[in-house]
DNA sequence: AATGCTCCAGCTGAGC
DNA sequence: GCTCAGCTGGAGCATT
């Protein structure tokens, strides 16, 4: 007998749907097992997403996130990571024009002391300093506070939030360089041997 | 080497995702083929959904849809189907109390003529008659117009929109009887040999 | 103070999300009320979807669904509606070529009797007859069974499943004529006065 | 005239849908503007999600992510952040039982030199050392490499991947402590005065 | 071809 | 305890 093309297509699609359901069941089971073992399924899902990215894309994405977090003041004490600093160093606003030479323009930087614990007021001050530093054309690298000091993150926040705050000329560092879809060749591998 | 349980889970999930992608690709291809043949992919999707239902569920769903369409005035000239009429006949409002005996209470019914084409005004009149008939406790079966006559659909619309219009005692016919999820046994097979 | 454009955007999006949540809450409440009144929320959702369509689109969609149902054998005793018949009558396959003149080519049609209830075997026979009629180039209109007779639907199923069964030249009637998106003008109003 | 309750509900839902569409339009416009300004819409969406979290939840989530990344070897040169180190320090596996006293059990640690750039082989070695350190019951804090040194991240990766690698007793540090839904009060603020 | 929108199914938390 | 409404992620579709 000659079965209609429509029926053939429907059967095919139903077969595919069947197999898909089976896969979904399998997946649920695996997730359930992971949860039983003590893992957090949401975080595992995050990892799956990150593992799809190339290392360069991953770095770029993390750097962008950190920059945006900083600009929004949700750095939570974590200072800017290396990749973010590197991105921002390439364009504090534009090439750092003179008029405010980055080197000498920081005479009144507070010494990076206070290992025991800076007060909230001090942290706020650091944020303000960061914004001012950006205005003066200094690079993010000019952050005077040591790693681990909450003021380091605050300074970063201030610096980032100053970037782009005038509503014009948001520099290219804020743009995603690597394409969202895996495109093809080497998107921006961040410079391996650098 | 002993691979970590987290890594094992991640690999498993990635494998599942991989197979799922393959399935999605296959499905897309089939749909594309169907479209090329001249079929409408949306309607095919509808068919897949309907084929998942048992005949009884299907009939119930279609009956409900027709009743709701009628009540909303979007019957588009299609009169109520058999299943919808059957549902509604069970409860015009409640058991058709006497006081208005369905049989004799329709002395002024317009004769179901007009084969060539009723005017919009006549159709509206039929709608009003349907509503009045409902108010008088008559069953949907009392529709005097022949199949194919647009006034038949209009009468149905009027009748349905009168049901439940007083804001209270929406009869059970409007409820879904068969469970949404395939539940178990025979939900309401509608009476095969009836 | 000059608030950063990024922050402004974020605030704006958060505000929009807030209002969206409020709307979702409102919608849930309405649906809950409908369910309490005794309505089926799924069917209501169907109605909302149908009401978005123009009458012509609605008719077309319903006609297509019925044709597809018939071709798949899930007509459930409901014969093809007017719109579906009209669509199919325009192209039984192509213009009904001669070689099998539709009019006289049905000498052995079974008389549309059996008002009490045809047997399953009789229904199957009707399905086969429908397919044969299609092969002979007869239009759907040639269905000899009366409305209400289950064999009418079966004949339709047979006819539809024969259409397109040869894997080539699926006629235009199976295609959606009205665009999915409301496009612009009158897409195919089905011919009012026809 | 008395409008039916069904129609009232449908109208209400359509009104809500209308307003929702308006909101969607507004949102699209905002996103478009953000893109025009040079921001990345995906990252902005991430920020919106993070801003919904309390600082404690945020820290916890980031810490978990870093730990999972480390265990999966996708740290990309970024060593474990403070929050992650803190979480892991609480339970290297269990309370660090003696039998391998953390302090003296590291005689052959490589000196944390190599500012110019460690070779891949050296990085791999650091990874192995981290795993070994975990096996010996040493805390994550024992990482001998300086911040900025890629081997620090590698050591962390090794340490994390060793945790839980035996398939049993995944310590509580890997579990999410703060509820996913905002629950109630301060869930685990991470210890302010530390 | 890249992106945003829409729909849909699967997962998750609440409510009876 | 189970079901159900809401939510998120993914795919198809249209658009630019």
Image: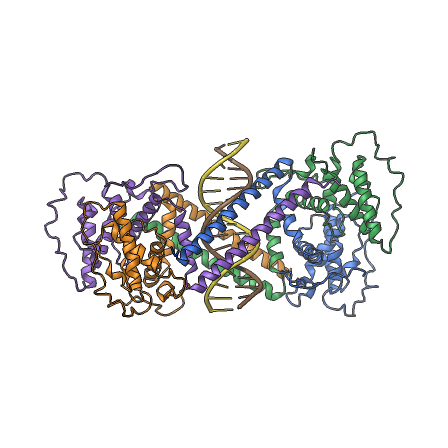
Chain colours: A orange, B green, C blue, D purple, E yellow, F brown
- Estimate the x, y position of residue B68 in percent, counting from the top left: 69, 44
Question: Above or below — where is B44 with respect to B177?
Answer: below
Question: Above or below — where is B189 with respect to A126?
Answer: above
Residue C114 visible from this viewpoint:
no
Residue D59 visible from this viewpoint:
yes
Q: Quadrant of the N terminus of chain A?
A: bottom right
**Residue drawn at (35%, 64%), measured in percent from left and top?**
A173
**Residue drawn at (82%, 58%), measured in percent from left and top?**
C108
Residue D187 figure quarter: top left
Question: Above or below — where is B91 with respect to A47?
Answer: above
- Estimate the x, y position of residue B144 in percent, counting from the top left: 84, 44
- Estimate the x, y position of residue A128 in percent, counting from the top left: 29, 54
Considering depth in this image, is B32 or B170 the residue closer to the camera?
B170
Query: A141 left or right of D53?
Result: left
Query: A34 left or right of B181?
Result: left
Residue C34 figure quarter: top right
Q: Quadrant of the C terminus of chain A?
A: bottom left
Considering depth in this image, is B54 or D176 the residue closer to the camera?
D176
Query: C61 left or right of A113?
Result: right
Counting every numbered tag in the picture gives: 0
- Estimate the x, y position of residue A155 in percent, counting from the top left: 28, 55
Considering depth in this image, is D81 or B99 the residue closer to the camera?
D81
């Amino acid at each position: 007998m000659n079965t209609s093309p429509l029926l053939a297509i429907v059967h095919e699609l139903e077969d595919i749907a069947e197999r898909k359901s089976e896969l979904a069941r399998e997946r649920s089971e695996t997730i359930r097992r992971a949860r039983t073992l003590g893992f957090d399924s949401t975080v595992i899902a995050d990892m799956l997403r990150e593992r799809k990215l190339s290392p360069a894309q991953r770095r770029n994405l993390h750097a962008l996130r950190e920059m945006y977090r900083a600009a929004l003041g949700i750095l939570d004490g974590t200072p800017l990571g290396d990749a973010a600093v590197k991105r921002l160093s390439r364009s504090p606003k534009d090439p750092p024009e003179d008029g405010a030479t980055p080197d000498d323009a920081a005479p009144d930087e507070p010494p990076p002391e206070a290992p025991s614990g800076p007060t909230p007021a001090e942290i706020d001050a650091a944020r303000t300093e960061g914004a001012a530093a950006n205005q003066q054309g200094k690079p993010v690298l000019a952050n005077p506070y040591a790693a681990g000091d909450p003021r380091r993150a605050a300074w970063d926040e201030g610096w980032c939030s100053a970037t782009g705050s005038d509503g014009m000329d948001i520099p290219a560092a804020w743009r995603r360089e690597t394409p969202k879809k895996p495109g093809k060749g080497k998107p921006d591998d961040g410079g391996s041997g650098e």
